[in-house]
Amino acid sequence: MKINEVIALTGDKLTESIAENNDTGCSAEDLTKIVESHRANQWDEAVDGADYLTQLQEGKKPWQM
């Protein structure tokens, strides 16, 4: 598959394409969400490691905020 074909894929087709050669240990569905978030530029502000650990120690789940 050519890179231009992958770029044009969305939804289930993108998930299927990712699953074909996925040896990352992450699910194809999760990787699809990452690709779609990146394409839509849906990223939160960066958090450094110390802040992340502080949030965890406070019982917060930063990935759900």
Image (spheres, rainbow, N blue to C red):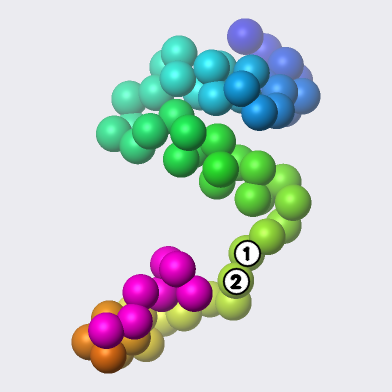
Q: Residue at x 64, y 18 (%)?
A: 13
Q: Residue at x 39, y 23 (%)?
A: 22
61 drawn magenta: yes
- The secondary element bearing badge 1 is classed as loop
Q: Horizontal and vertical percent for residue 48?
A: 41, 81
> Depth check: 1 or 65 in front?
65
Q: Horizontal and vertical percent for residue 65?
A: 49, 74
Q: Residue at x 60, y 71 (%)?
A: 44
Q: Which residue is mark 1?
A: 43
Q: Residues within 10 Å of mark 1 (few under 14, many from 20)?
A: few
19 up-or-down from 38: above or below? above
Is the C-beta separation of discs 1 and 2 under 8 Å?
yes
Q: Which residue is mark 2?
A: 44
Image quadrant occupied by the N terminus: top right
- The secondary element bearing badge 2 is classed as loop
**Magenta part of the protein: which range?**
59-65
Name which residue type carries label 1. Answer: Trp
